Image: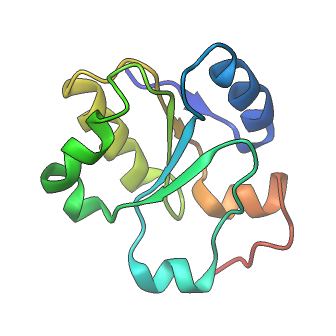
Amino acid sequence: MVPQLNPADFSAWRDNAGAGAPALPVVLDVREPWELQTATVKEDGFRLVHIPMREIPARLPELQEAGAGQPIACLCHHGMRSLQVANYLTQSGFTEVVNLQGGINAWSQQVDRSVPVY
């Protein structure tokens, strides 16, 4: 089962996940391009990667380049698509995957109120 991460706890996860890691933790935003134009998170101690959910299988090698131990937090609108992607990544051998519970909607409420709610 993929761990659920409350956006309010993201900073602590990011700092812990990044300690000793060769690369910054990744926030994998799996929303559609039109959603990104509506609202997005700002990189802050993590690398933001946009890959729509339907493209994940074909673009898996891009994520594998950093290694299966790369810390990845999956993000979508409300947390359901990202949970499916997080499960897929775990089944594909990734070991440090979490799902941002409540998605960008919860991020806007708990982390950065400047992110529009839609």
| 34 relative to 17, above or below | below
Classify residue 22 as left or right of residue 11.
left
Q: Quadrant of the N terminus?
A: top left
**Direction left: furthest residue:** 58
**Direction front: furthest residue:** 22
Q: Nearer the viewer, residue 97 or 106?
A: 97
Q: Residue at the spot x=21%, y=63% of the render? A: 54
Classify residue 83 as left or right of residue 104.
left
**Direction right: furthest residue:** 113
Q: Nearer the viewer, residue 9 or 18?
A: 18
Q: Residue at the spot x=32%, y=22% of the render? A: 68
Res. 10 image quadrant:
top right
Q: Residue at the spot x=68%, y=63% of the render? A: 41
| 11 relative to 44, above or below | above
Q: Residue at the spot x=85%, y=73% of the render? A: 114
Numbered marks: total: 0
